[in-house]
């Protein structure tokens, strides 16, 4: 599994204060679609208030193992492994050699690779699924799993989590 760690700058980052009169996350999400609203409540309970709040977006910087987490009031339909709505994108620093990029992108359309920035992210409706997607992406990029095996393991892991509340180490940071 990928060990997700924050850099020294991220660990020492001071919380940012809100501008006077700015909206709170709770005020904004009250009018949001159901899935992003539910995910927002979960994220606020776990990580506290986001550092950035707009009418359609919440962003937490250096939250837990993530470089940043971006939650949007947009439900992106995704049918793998079961129908759900992607709303939460979570990013880590990640370098990959160029000859592995195509294979990595074939593995999962919700894994977003930005080679120039040295970042990889996953977008789903659950943080656990984002951990799983990035951990498996690392396996694919480093030749520990084929694309087919990673997709099969992803589907099996998500079904076990959703139906039996079973979580393997790939579902954690």
Image (cartoon, rainbow, N blue to C red):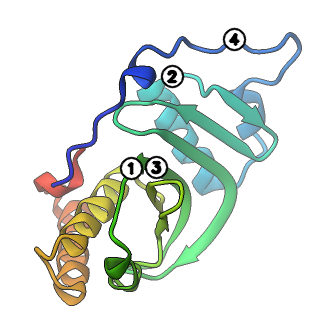
Residue neighbourhood size for the residue with mark 2, other residues' Cα within 10 Å, grouped as few (<14), some (14–19), many (≥20): few
Find residue 48 and name its label.
2
Camera-near label (4 vs 2) is 4
Would residue 79 appear left or right of 156 to someone viewing this image? right
* Image height of 159 relative to 124, above or below: below
Mark 1 or mark 3: which comes first in sequence? 3
Which part of the image, by quadrant, shows the N terminus?
bottom left
Residue on which disc 1 sits? 127
**Front residue of 135 and 26:** 135
Q: Position of residue 50 (x, y in %)?
A: 60, 28
- Residue drawn at x 18%, y 69% is 139
Q: Position of residue 140 (x, y in %)?
A: 22, 75
> Dividing the picture into quarters, in which one does residue 155 lie?
bottom left
Residue on which disc 4 sits? 17
Mark 4 or mark 3: which comes first in sequence? 4
User: SS class of the residue under badge 2?
Assistant: loop
User: SS class of the residue under badge 1?
Assistant: helix
User: SS class of the residue under badge 4?
Assistant: loop
Spatial separation of the CA atoms under disc 1 and disc 4: 25 Å
Q: In the rendered structure, are the residues bearing label 3 and label 2 in contact, judged by CB atoms less than 8 Å apart?
A: no
Q: Position of residue 94 (x, y in %)?
A: 36, 54
Spatial separation of the CA atoms under disc 3 and disc 2: 18 Å
Residue on which disc 3 sits? 91
């Amino acid at each position: 599994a990928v060990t997700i760690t924050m850099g020294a700058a991220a660990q020492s980052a001071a919380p940012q204060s809100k501008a006077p009169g700015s909206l709170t996350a709770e005020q904004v999400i009250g009018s949001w679609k159901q899935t992003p609203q539910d995910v927002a409540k979960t994220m606020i309970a776990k990580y506290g208030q986001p550092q950035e709040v707009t009418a359609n977006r919440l962003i937490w910087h250096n939250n837990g193992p993530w470089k940043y987490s971006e939650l949007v009031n947009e439900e992106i339909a995704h049918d793998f492994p079961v129908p759900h709505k992607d709303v939460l994108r979570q990013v880590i620093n990640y370098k990959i050699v160029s000859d592995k990029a195509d294979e990595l992108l074939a593995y999962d359309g919700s894994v977003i690779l930005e080679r120039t920035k040295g970042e990889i992210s996953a977008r789903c409706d659950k943080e656990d699924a984002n951990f799983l997607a990035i951990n498996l992406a690392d396996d694919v990029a480093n030749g520990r799993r084929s694309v087919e095996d990673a997709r099969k393991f992803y589907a099996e892991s998500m079904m076990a989590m959703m139906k039996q509340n079973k979580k393997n180490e790939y579902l954690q940071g």
